[in-house]
Amino acid sequence: MTFAIVVGTQWGDEGKGKVVDYYAAQADIVVRYCGGANAGHTIVSGGRKFAFHHVPSGVLYPEKINIIGNGVVLEPKKFFEELGQLDAVGIKPNIKISPRVHLVMPYHVAQDGAEEGRKGALAAGTTKRGIGPCYSDKAARFGIRVGELLQPELFREKLHTMHTLKVKLLKEVYGVDFTQSEDEICKLYTEYGKRLAPFVADTGEILSDALSKKKQVLFEGAQATMLDIDHGMYPFGTSSNTSAGGACTGSGIGPTAIDEVIGVVKVYTSRVGAGPLPTELNDATGQAIRDKGGEYGTTTGRPRRIGWLDLPTLRYAAHVNGLTGLAFTRLDTLSGMQKVQVCTHYELDGKKLLIPPASYTDIARCRPIYKSFAGWDDIGADKWRACAKGGMKSLPARAQAYLKFISGEVRVPIYVIGVGAGREDTIVLKEVFSKKA
Ligand code: GDP
Ligand code: IMO
Ligand code: MG
């Protein structure tokens, strides 16, 4: 029996979806525990490409239970769109949604856009999916939960209070006319409620039962450590606890249940949205990596900012999450370069920093200090795939040296190495679940 968390160690888009899809093959249950439709998790399986925003990345295995835990915020429209896309290719996933999940309402989306417009230099460049306003309402105890959609009178009453308040807020503070009427939203969401009802289940109970029956459970992180509301680069992150602790609070399981925490590490840095990025490459090298890796946001299509790998961030992620293993991705993307750099530490006001400071204004002043590595050749897709079978020792020697250096610096062993986007392009050094017959 294993309960394992897969978590992003950087600024998101590390390749969590791919790693979850790999380990999910041996899991009984896959659980999303944070975020909402801001996430974009890409899986390439059997030559087909899927991008998931709401549904857990275990859905490609129809026999698995896929849980949307209480820490998630759900936008029903997007959720049903995603189910429709899966249905169109013959996939009917087994999804269970916690009644404690908060609903993203149309006024949250309007509020997200309006607030971003007023934040000036403090705007994080959100995905405009209403994430911040929805979590704000949750914390302020104004939120509407999935379970309440199933109680029409309570839903109507809460909607009335919130709609009146939000129309006024949007108009009088932000100068935005929010024209969708209460009746219209009530009708739309009541319909969603009917469609959501078959999915709603006590997901905490399912997990507690799984624990007592010694099942294998995989928790799928969305976003990443540096986007965490508490531990990330505030305010340039998202609004939920995206790091490993969030897997417990966002699903209803105690920390003693967790056996493994796998940190997904892209072998360089990428970032969508605003905020300081110490190792950013605003040059031809950055552009070349972006082009080669097709580094454009899965959710918004925005070009991702690119930088060298940042060890201070990774050391920090190792202790914030309690990482037990590393899953490297994109070794193939970083190939074919003469020289590859890694930021080993920062310098700030004459001091050497091994982890990032708490304040973004200090991070912005940090000078990244680099160690250079000789690059490794791009051996081509077929040979990369062959490495997936041959194991780590079949990788170019310089690539092995690069990965071993990083793992040594953060003192976390390597579990996985990604050498391509496909499920088959994966070198696995450690399975976290016992293989089933
Ligand atoms: P997530 O949000 O962490 O799940 O990551 P995204 O799906 O947003 O972005 C990661 C991208 O990298 C996707 O397009 C994946 O298909 C791709 N990917 C993941 N691992 C690898 C890898 O090892 N090599 C290559 N070339 N692509 C990868
Ligand atoms: P996955 O799960 C990368 C970023 C946004 C913005 C900030 C806040 O695919 O790794 P939000 O809409 O959450 O209020 O935006 O966080 N962001 C992500 N960046 N990958 C993601 O998810 C992200 N989810 C949010 O760009 O800077
Ligand atoms: Mg993504």
Image (tube, rainbow, N blue to C red):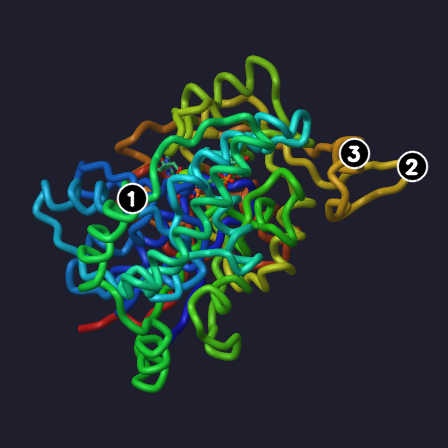
Disc 2 is placed on an element classified as: loop
Mark with earlier residue (1, 3): 1
Q: Earlier in the sequence, mark 2 or mark 1?
A: 1
Looking at the image, is mark 2 or mark 1 nearer the viewer?
1
Specify the amino acid type for callout 1: Asp
Q: Does the CB distance between marks 3 and 2 fall below 8 Å?
A: no
Comparing labels 3 and 2, the label whose residue is closer to the camera: 3
**Res. 350 mark:** 2
Residue 31 seen by the camera: no
Secondary structure found at label 1: helix
Can you tell me whether the CB of the residue at mark 3 lies under 8 Å from the nearest atom of ligand 2?
no
Position of residue 245 in the picture relative to residue 5 (left or right):
right
Q: Residue at x 34, y 69 (%)?
A: 217
Residue 8 at least partly seen: yes
Q: CA distance from mark 2 to mark 1?
A: 61 Å
Give the label on residue 183, or none: 1
Depth check: give the residue in front, 135 or 189. Answer: 189
Circle 2: residue type: Gly
Gap in angstroms between the C-alphas marked 1 and 3: 52 Å
Check if mark 2's residue and mark 1's residue have beta carbons within 8 Å.
no
- Picture quarter containing residue 101? bottom left
Q: CA distance from mark 3 to mark 2?
A: 10 Å
Horizontal side of 421 relative to 416 (left or right) equals: left
Q: Is residue 159 above or below residue 295?
A: below
Q: Secondary structure at mark 3?
A: loop
Of pointers 3 and 2, the one earlier in the residue sequence: 2
Q: Is mark 2 within 8 Å of ligand 2?
A: no
Question: Any mark on residue 366, and which?
Answer: 3
